[in-house]
Amino acid sequence: MVNSDSMPLVLGFCSQKRKKQRSGVCEYKSIYIAPINGVEWGHVVKSGGLEMFIGEYRHNIDEKGRLALPAKFRGKLADGVIVTKGLESSLVIYTVAEWGKIAPKLSELPYTQSNARAFSRLILSGANDCQLDRQGRINLPAHLRDYAKLKTNTVIVGVYSRIEVWDVKEWEAYKEKVENQSEEIAENLENLGL
């Protein structure tokens, strides 16, 4: 979004620190955030104008299938989230705004190609919209918990524009495999400028 002064807007809240009012918009370290309902919260991690989820967190799923999301992430998820099937037996959580970018791309995949149909069905048919409760939890439907082999112990991984939810054992096995191949993976990514 862009305001009348052509400054980028990100819907959310902002901290009192280093804030100055400007046409109903707060400036926070050169990032403009529109306040909602007068409620404010802390620093929003930004990189190139995008919200960013980073880090690895361990949380448990309770007996009702609820998963508490890391406190650091909750402010960015206040408008709700989309939870869907991910790759490598994980779940993926998107902000509503990020899902608004991804879902149209999936729906535009060529219907005549079986791999495109299969992938869009995997992601779109598994998608559920969720709201965080007062404790910052989301309810993970049973079919998604089964898909990702989630029982109780989970790892929540911030992966820039998305959040992944893994069973602890699945995550540890995946992470060990990737760490053992890290040099080979890095060499293969050289063409991408990394």
Image: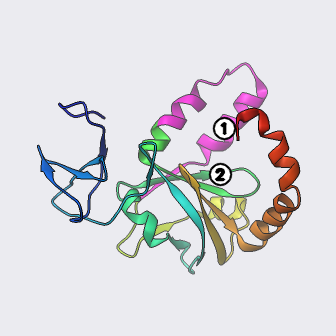
Q: In this view, does 68 lie to the left or right of 61?
A: left
Residue 192: percent from left, percent from top? 72, 34
Residue 105 placement: quadrant: top right
Dot 2 falls on a residue whose secondary structure is: strand
SS assignment for the magenta stretch, majority: helix
Q: Residue type at mark 2: give it.
A: Lys
Q: Provide the residue designation for mark 1.
A: 121
Mark number, residue 85: 2
Residue 6 placement: quadrant: top left
Give the position of the N terminus as an image quadrant: top left
Which segment did they paint magenta? 101-130
Residue 89 placement: quadrant: bottom right
Mark number, residue 148: none
Q: Is residue 28 left or right of residue 56?
A: left
Instruction: Reply yes or no: does residue 188 show up in magenta.
Output: no
Q: Is residue 100 left or right of residue 191?
A: left
Dot 1 falls on a residue whose secondary structure is: helix
Residue 17 sits above or below residue 191 on the image: below
Q: In terms of depth relative to the viewer, which is nearer, 137 or 35?
A: 35
Residue 107 sits above or below residue 162 on the image: above
